[in-house]
């Protein structure tokens, strides 16, 4: 009802009738002459026309406003969304358009938020994501996918997915759609490293149910594969390393059982060997347990700030005594500054590292020689190098000596020495716990040099030290 009263047509009709009524009243009241009647009719006509023009221009103005607003919406401009205060049909239509504008703006904002959310997820996703159209042509690839496949965005867009994944000899795009297989691919990433990718495919469909493309998710499993390989190797190494001494202990026990027990000298030597082998197994199991605790982050350092110079001299004094007793053809040369060097370390753990390196120096220097221990600092690191004159480590083995169970030339040179191949990997882990490092250099024949480095803070060491001033 309200609408009817506000309608332009009604207003027009009412005004027109009013004016016509006035004209009729004037005509019948004043018996107007023809000329006057004509004049009045003319005035009535002009007034009606003016009112009509006024209304029409009002209508045209509102229609223009509607048309401009539609143009604004088409240009994504939602700035002027003021409703009209008028109440006629066109203004109501205009106001509805404004409401629609608000609605579209809200939805667009929502869509934009979702789009940028999706974009950030895709950008920061560690897994690579590639999508294609329904013909298998790539239309989107995230940052991770480009890096994993060593491709650029321009180089990949529009290309066939099976070509980019280099699987066109085994699969057609149709196969991917039908079987959605899980593939393992070997590729080279943007840093030139070999990577193992697990690729999963998923179809995506439009609302009508038609397949509109495929999504390929690329997962870098290089680390996982390596861990799995290392785990298998580790289990096989442990079994192998324990089987060897166990077999020999069993052989000696059998020999004793078969009559060697009757020969006291032979029996004593068999028991001796068995004990040595058992000791080795116990040592190995102890070391394995220690490594396993470090792997599980169960080992906590009990650090204290100590004068490292005193600490290292104390250890070397101990070794001097051992040399005096057992290794007369060895000598330890100290190149250690007199100045104090304060470091925050776990002394027990670090003694274990240095003991292992010096013991190795004895083990792998059959002709004895000088073991030179040097300590020095630079701005933020303290170093300790331990150099021997032993058999050295061949170049290809240098990077492996810190691996678990690794022993250079397992068969010959280590067989009599009887190490476990675990000492240096424990040393390496302990240095990592100290946020330090351990490195080795060797020319493969004339000795080896192991260098430890630790974080060193000037705050603790304020004095100006003269590092040239060595105490021999
Ligand atoms: P192991 O118990 O066998 O000594 P380590 O982990 O301490 O185990 O050392 C790993 C391997 O590194 C040793 O088996 C040996 O082949 C090599 N190695 C370690 N230290 C030296 C050294 N000073 N000179 C030569 N080879 C060494």
Image: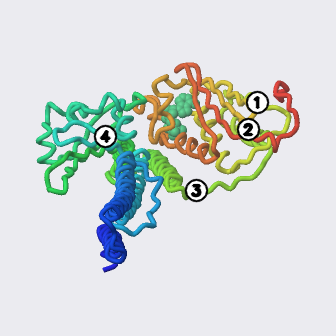
- In three-dimensional space, the C-alpha distance between marks 3 and 4, rounded to whole angstroms, equals 46 Å
Is there any visible trace of residue 413 in the rendered image? yes
Which residue is labeled 3 in the image? 299
Counting residues from the N terminus, which is met first, the one under dot 4 or under dot 1? 4
Please indicate whether residue 144 sits to the left or right of residue 400 in the image: left
- In three-dimensional space, the C-alpha distance between marks 4 and 1, rounded to whole angstroms, equals 64 Å
- Does residue 14 sit above or below 70 in this rendering? below
The quarter of the displayed image where residue 460 is located: top right
Q: Label 1: state its secondary structure.
A: strand
Q: Is mark 2 within 8 Å of ligand 1?
A: no
Q: Label 4: state its secondary structure.
A: strand
Which residue is labeled 1 in the image? 334
Percent of width and height locating residue 86: 42, 67
Q: Is mark 4 within 8 Å of ligand 1?
A: no
Q: Is mark 1 within 8 Å of ligand 1?
A: no
In the foreground, 155 or 271: 155
- Does residue 287 sit above or below 437 in this rendering? below
Q: Residue at x 75, y 44 (%)?
A: 343
Counting residues from the N terminus, which is met first, the one under dot 4 or under dot 2? 4
Q: Residue at x 54, y 39 (%)?
A: 424
Q: Image quadrant for the N terminus?
A: bottom left
Residues packed near mark 4 inside 10 Å, few (<14), some (14 to 19) or many (20 plus)? some
Percent of width and height locating residue 275: 48, 50
- In three-dimensional space, the C-alpha distance between marks 1 and 3, rounded to whole angstroms, equals 31 Å
Where residue 140 is drawn, which disc sits there?
Answer: 4
Residues packed near mark 3 inside 10 Å, few (<14), some (14 to 19) or many (20 plus)? some
Counting residues from the N terminus, which is met first, the one under dot 2 or under dot 1? 2
Confirm or deny contact between disc 2 and disc 1 (CB under 8 A): yes
- In three-dimensional space, the C-alpha distance between marks 3 and 2, rounded to whole angstroms, equals 26 Å
Which residue is labeled 2 in the image? 316
């Amino acid at each position: 009802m309200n609408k009817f009263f506000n309608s332009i047509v009604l207003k027009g009709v009412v005004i027109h009738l009013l004016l016509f009524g006035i004209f009729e009243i004037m005509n019948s009241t004043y018996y107007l002459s023809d000329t006057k009647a004509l004049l009045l009719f003319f005035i009535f006509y002009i007034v009606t026309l003016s009112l009509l023009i006024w209304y029409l221009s009002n209508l045209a103005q509102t229609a223009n406003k509607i048309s401009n607003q539609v143009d604004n919406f088409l240009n994504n401009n939602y700035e002027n969304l003021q409703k009209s205060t008028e109440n006629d049909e066109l203004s109501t239509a205009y106001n509805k358009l404004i409401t629609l504008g608000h609605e579209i703006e809200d939805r667009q904002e929502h869509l934009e938020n979702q789009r940028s959310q999706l974009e950030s997820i895709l950008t920061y996703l560690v897994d690579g994501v590639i999508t294609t159209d329904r013909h298998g042509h790539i239309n989107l690839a995230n940052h991770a996918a480009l890096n994993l496949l060593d491709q650029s965005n321009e180089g990949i867009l529009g290309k066939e997915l099976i070509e980019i994944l280099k699987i066109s000899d085994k699969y057609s795009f149709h196969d991917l759609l039908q079987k959605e297989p899980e593939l393992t691919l070997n590729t080279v990433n943007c840093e030139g490293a070999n990577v193992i990718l697990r690729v999963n495919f998923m179809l995506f469909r439009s609302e009508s149910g038609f397949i509109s493309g495929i999504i390929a998710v690329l997962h870098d499993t290089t680390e996982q594969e390596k861990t799995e390989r290392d785990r298998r190797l580790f289990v096989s190494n442990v079994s192998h390393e324990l089987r060897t001494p166990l077999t020999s202990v069993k052989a000696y026990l059998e020999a004793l059982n078969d009559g060697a027990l009757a020969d006291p000298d032979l029996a004593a030597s068999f028991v001796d060997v068995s004990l040595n082998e058992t000791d080795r197994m116990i040592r190995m199991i102890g070391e394995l347990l220690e490594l396993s605790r470090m792997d599980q982050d169960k080992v906590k350092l009990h650090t204290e700030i100590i004068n490292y110079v005193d600490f290292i001299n104390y250890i070397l004094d101990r070794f001097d005594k051992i040399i005096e007793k057992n290794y007369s053809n060895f000598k330890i040369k100290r190149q250690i500054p007199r100045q104090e060097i304060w470091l925050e370390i776990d002394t027990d753990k670090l003694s274990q590292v240095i003991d292992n390196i010096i013991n190795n120096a004895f083990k792998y220097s059959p002709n004895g020689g000088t073991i030179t221990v040097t300590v020095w600092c630079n701005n933020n690191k303290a170093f300790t190098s331990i150099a021997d004159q032993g058999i050295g480590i061949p170049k290809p083995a240098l990077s492996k000596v810190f691996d678990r169970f690794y022993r250079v030339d397992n068969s010959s040179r280590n067989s009599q020495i009887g190490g476990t191949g675990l000492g240096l990997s424990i040393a390496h882990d302990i240095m990592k716990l100290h946020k330090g490092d351990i490195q080795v250099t060797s020319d493969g024949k004339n000795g080896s040099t192991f260098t430890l480095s630790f974080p060193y803070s000037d705050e603790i060491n304020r004095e100006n030290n003269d590092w040239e001033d060595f105490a021999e």
